[in-house]
Image (cartoon, rainbow, N blue to C red):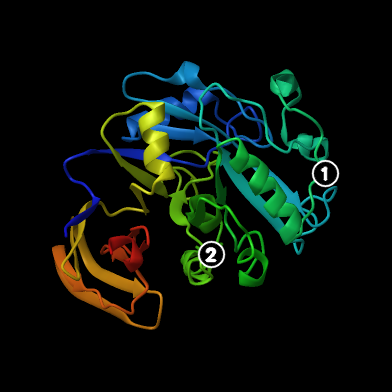
Amino acid sequence: MKHVLIDKGLNFYKANLHCHTTLSDGRLTREEVKDTYKERGYSIVAFTDHEHLIDNSCLNDESFLAITSAELAIKEYPKQSTLVNRKMKVCHLNVLSPDPHYDITPCYSSVYDHYINDENRNLIKFEKEFKRAHTTKGINKIIRKANEKGFLVSFNHPSWSLENATDYVGLEGLWAVEIYNHGVVTAGGMADEHAFDDLLRAGKKVYCVCADDNHNADPLDSVRSDSFGGFTVVNCDKLDYESVFASLKNGYFYASTGPEIKELVYEDGKVKFECSEVKKVRLVTEGRRTSAIINNGITSGEFEIKENDGYFRLCFEDKDGKCAYTQAYELCDFE
């Protein structure tokens, strides 16, 4: 049976799912972010300003969609700054609202409201004060409460947060893990592809995203700019909130820092792909079995998938070292 995993017959919408503006600690306004990202081919931005959901639907037009979202922090020592205590573990979660107009911040904590600009405090909406705890139980409580309201919850930049598998494999209800954060990488930090497999091999059903986490302290044309480096491509029929959110929720998207994935199909024990020109395509499975196609100018190909592979995913690398990542697909889903 043929399973179309990335459908070239649908539209592809480029998205930045991690972004900060002057509503928190970013340097560009919402309108400036919209304009600069649209100019570079983006159709979707999740405005994940710190600690408060903002309904940004006023920015929407026929070619641009703003996702109502926020970034929540949970620190080992809540009153200490990560700029001062650089050895402190933290957990940052992005929460994406299922409704563009639902802007009640889940698990709001005034301990963290220093992220919010004073002139924007009137925009905060929350049900009641919530005490956050940097423990597996405490973080799971936040994820669960967000899930109950229909939010998609992503786990951001694990390496920057100083978190490893012992910290995050116990998390339940995550929608995605951020495997590339452009702001972190341009500052000399690490990408987190390994965290994706850590979670998958722990039995978690989770997707992967690449994002900018842009604050725009440096000029947009600077080599240190934290914009336009990590993105997610949503594969769906139309650019409206319901369609995009459903595609994100169900894994109809891929993550990238450059290459394009044009089609992905699983059929008769093989996964077949079409892509922009790359030099290497890697197959990753649940176990040790891997494979690779290495050649200049690869635009299509296939891999055999074996019954005991558990799951499979592909990584595409171009001549500049930029990569695109499919989601992980479990063989049991094709039975």
CA neighbours of label 1 inside 10 A, class few (<14), some (14 to 19), many (20+): few
Residue 189 visible from this viewpoint:
yes
147 or 264, nearer to the observer:
147
Quarter in which the N terminus is drawn? bottom left
The x and y percentages for residue 34 are 44, 27
Q: Is residue 131 left or right of residue 274?
A: right
Q: Is residue 281 left or right of residue 14?
A: left
Looking at the rendered structure, the secondary structure element under dot 1 is loop
268 or 171, nearer to the observer:
268
Looking at the rendered structure, the secondary structure element under dot 2 is loop
Q: Label 1: which residue?
A: 131
Question: Which residue sits at x=53%, y=66%?
Answer: 199
Front disc: 1 or 2? 1
The x and y percentages for residue 38 are 36, 29
Q: Quadrant of residue 16?
A: top left
User: In the figure, 237 relative to 248: above or below?
Assistant: above
The x and y percentages for residue 134 are 77, 56
Q: Quadrant of residue 167?
A: bottom right
| Amino acid at dot 1 | Lys
Q: Label 2: which residue?
A: 190
Question: Which residue sits at x=51%, y=27%?
Answer: 99
Asked if marks 1 and 2 touch (Cβ < 8 Å), the reply is no
CA neighbours of label 2 inside 10 A, class few (<14), some (14 to 19), many (20+): some
Work out whether mark 1 precedes mark 2 in sequence or the reverse, and give the earlier one.
Answer: 1
Q: Which mark is residue 334?
A: none
Q: Quadrant of residue 279?
A: bottom left
| Amino acid at dot 2 | Met
User: In the figure, 45 relative to 233: above or below?
Assistant: above
Spatial CA span between label 1 and label 2: 30 Å
Tag count: 2
Q: Residue furthest bottom?
A: 288
226 or 80, nearer to the observer:
80
